[in-house]
DNA sequence: CAGTGGTCTAGACCACGAG
DNA sequence: TCGTGGTCTAGACCACTGT
């Protein structure tokens, strides 16, 4: 089963066009330089303008390009945004050129209980695999993570050795592909045991992140609660005025 | 053929359709109930399927509906997401049923200096209006905010009484409409003076948020640095796996 | 298998920006 | 004025879901 994402057809013209445009943006063009017009792109790629527009829409949403009616489409300044994209810790660290790892990994299968059950829409009696990991980058502790996965959708997970990317394991072994996550970020301070695990002073500031992950069919796949060192982490993203409501 | 319709504009068919769908979602339909099919909607509204799809795309992105190929489009569970939408403090508080206000408002016009200049892409000598406000909800301090706006795009701003929504003032008086913002969120703790302003214990956790806001033409409009009480704030949003890269 | 969403074509007119 | 992006029409075929 090759990958190719939901879009069964090995690529799709939009995806090829996207790849080409990304090459332009990262390579030949500098910020605020003009991309070819939509009509030019459509013709030279043998696709419709709609297809071109969909690719540009996505890039615009990701903050890579911006468009001005009547003028053209332009390369954005180097982006600060990284969030609003769903990545795993492993992917995230690799993208930053760091080597991801884990310390103190523990796995167990336990009843969900009230809180975890509620997060995963399970009965409190149903079982979940519980992973505890101290995630590291280049060997340095970055984050403490508790992950809960319904046992019924990933049988035997608690008996496996988890190393590296959990998402990769879920995809390859259980065909569970996370498409979407609801995330809630809080600011907190580290109590002494957590501070020690992360190797920072007691009562240092930190992010506490709660995440519920879903697959394409809105089935809950994972609940994770993580604590990140604030000295090494920030959340950077681009937000847009929502649509054309403009009511107020 | 060649219908023409002139297309009244003033909303566009997509916007009307969106309003109708929002009514369905918030009114008659419950979570996980099925919306009409795209083809039905297209016919009953006298638009193309593409137009229907664009409206549904947007709702899907906002987390209001989810779609499953071969099955249909369904109402999402009540959303937790609020972020990934650009709102002002004023709008945000009103949306939560609270009365927004400000304490200790100060306004001055000063040279941008190195840091603010860099954020706003101004020479350090150019002037900016600097607003300092303690934002309140139902009279309770929620956030401390420093806002910087280039004097050349909002002349005389520093001489005005700022009350209520700055964004509203910028739109109505200077025709500056924020469309996009880059935001960076950090976790921190409150030093004693800030803690006092916010009425919370010293060294309480807090969010520090830096924001650069742009208009539709990518002109920088505002740089803001805010500190929010962590006991009253969290960032909740939905994130999606980005497109079809899937390189993994 | 029928029906759904996902992608695409080949046009058209409109609103805006710049020369 | 002319070229740009923004919106829309009227179809088509494909991939996936459910029965």
Image: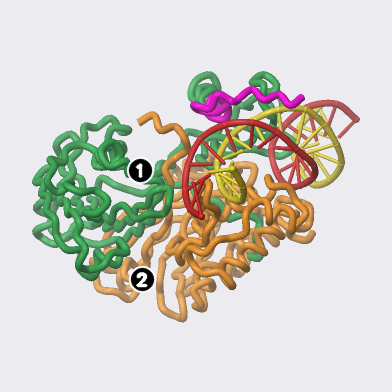
Chain colours: A orange, B green, C red, D yellow
Q: Position of residue A188 (x, y in %)?
A: 28, 58
- The structure residue drawn at horizontal position 66% and vertical position 63%, both measured from the top left corner, is A19
Instruction: Look at mark 1 in the image and give the residue it sits on.
Output: B177
Where, quadrant-wise, is the N terminus of chain B in this rendering? top right
Tag count in the figure? 2
> Which residue is denoted by mark 2 in the rendering?
A232
Task: Read off the magenta span.
Answer: B1-18
Asked where in the image residue B41 lies, by quadrant, the reply is top right
Name the image quarter holding the C terminus of chain B: bottom right
* Chain containing the residue with disc 2: A
Examine the rendered structure and indicate whether residue B167 appears above or below residue A131. Answer: above
Q: Residue at x 38, y 49 (%)?
A: B215
Please tell me which residue lies in front, A174 or B230: B230
Q: 10 Å neighbourhood of mark 2: few (<14), some, or many (≥20)?
A: few
| Residue A240 location (% of width, % of height) | 43, 46
Q: Is residue B105 at least partly visible in the picture? A: yes
Q: Is residue B9 magenta?
A: yes
**Residue B21 placement, left or right of D14:** left
């Amino acid at each position: 089963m090759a990958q190719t994402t939901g879009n069964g057809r090995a690529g799709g013209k939009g995806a090829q066009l996207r790849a080409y445009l990304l090459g332009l943006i990262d390579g030949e063009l500098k910020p605020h330089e003009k991309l070819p017009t939509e009509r030019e792109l459509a013709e030279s790629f043998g696709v419709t303008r709609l297809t071109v527009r969909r690719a540009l829409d996505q890039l615009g949403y990701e903050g890579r390009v911006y468009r001005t009616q009547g003028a053209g489409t332009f390369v954005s300044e180097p982006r600060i945004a990284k969030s609003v994209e769903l990545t795993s810790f492993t992917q995230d660290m690799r993208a930053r050129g760091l080597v991801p790892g884990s310390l103190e990994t523990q796995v167990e299968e336990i009843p969900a209980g009230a809180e975890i059950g509620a997060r995963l829409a399970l009965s409190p009696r149903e079982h979940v695999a519980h992973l505890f990991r101290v995630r590291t980058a280049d060997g340095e502790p970055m984050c403490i993570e508790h992950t809960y996965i319904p046992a019924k959708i990933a049988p035997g997970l608690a008996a496996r050795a988890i190393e590296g990317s959990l998402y990769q394991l879920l995809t390859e072994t259980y065909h569970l592909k996370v498409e979407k996550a609801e995330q809630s970020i809080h600011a907190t301070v580290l109590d002494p045991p957590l501070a020690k695990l992360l190797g920072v002073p007691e009562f240092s500031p930190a992010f506490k992140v709660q995440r519920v992950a879903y697959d394409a069919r809105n089935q809950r796949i994972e609940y994770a609660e993580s604590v990140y060192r604030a000295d090494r982490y920030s959340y950077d993203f681009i937000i847009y005025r929502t649509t054309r409501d403009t009511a107020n």
